[in-house]
Amino acid sequence: MSRVHRYQVTLTPLPEAGSNGGDTPPALVFTHHNHDDLVQITERVRQASGLDADSAAATAVGLKLLGGVMLSERDNPLFDGLRQPLRELIQALKALSKRG
């Protein structure tokens, strides 16, 4: 049986520059589980992608979150148009990681 990694994802809005922070909406918090170690994957994408650290992290985490939902919802036609392009993007990232 493979290990399941559990995460609490928190997206905290930052106040606009020059604001007093009173209009900042509350944080968005949810849980997610994945068979992969997202922290490790994010570090590999940061090292291999050529993206800045924040963009690489957003790409890695976003892809893994979306991919995980798509796997659990494999019969949902909502994702039909994304399956092949997402697969190709993930394969391209893996290829970069192996070269680096």
Image: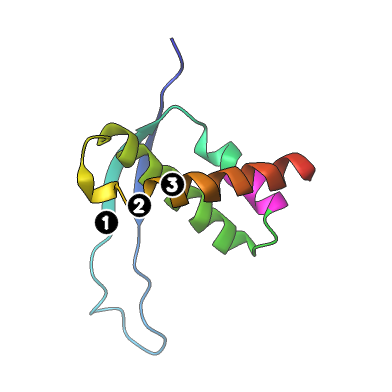
Residue 72 lies in what quarter of the image?
top left
Q: Residue furthest bottom?
A: 18
Res 84 label: 3
Give me the C-alpha separation between circle 1 and circle 3: 29 Å
* Mark found first going from the N terminus, 1 or 2: 2
Regarding mark 2 in the picture, which secondary structure is present there? Answer: strand
Is mark 1 in CB contact (under 8 Å) with mark 2? yes
Name the residue located 35 percent from the left edge and 62 percent from the top edge.
12
| Prevailing secondary structure class for the magenta stretch in the rendered image | helix
Residue at 22% from the left image edge and 50% from the top image edge: 78
Q: Position of 97 compared to 76: left or right?
A: right
Of mark 2 and mark 3, the one earlier in the sequence is: 2
Q: Nearer the viewer, residue 26 or 69?
A: 69
Give above or below for 1 relative to 39. Answer: above
Q: Is residue 23 left or right of residue 95?
A: left
- The region drawn magenta spans 42-48
- The image position of residue 41, as x and y in percent, is 58, 40
What is the three-letter code of the residue carrying label 2?
Thr
x and y, in percent, of residue 56 in the image: 58, 57
**Within the magenta stretch, is there residue 46?**
yes
Q: Relative to 37, does residue 12 appear above or below in the rendering? A: below
Please give the residue where the numbered disc 1 appears in the rendered image: 28
Q: Secondary structure at mark 3?
A: helix
Q: Nearer the viewer, residue 22 or 1?
A: 1
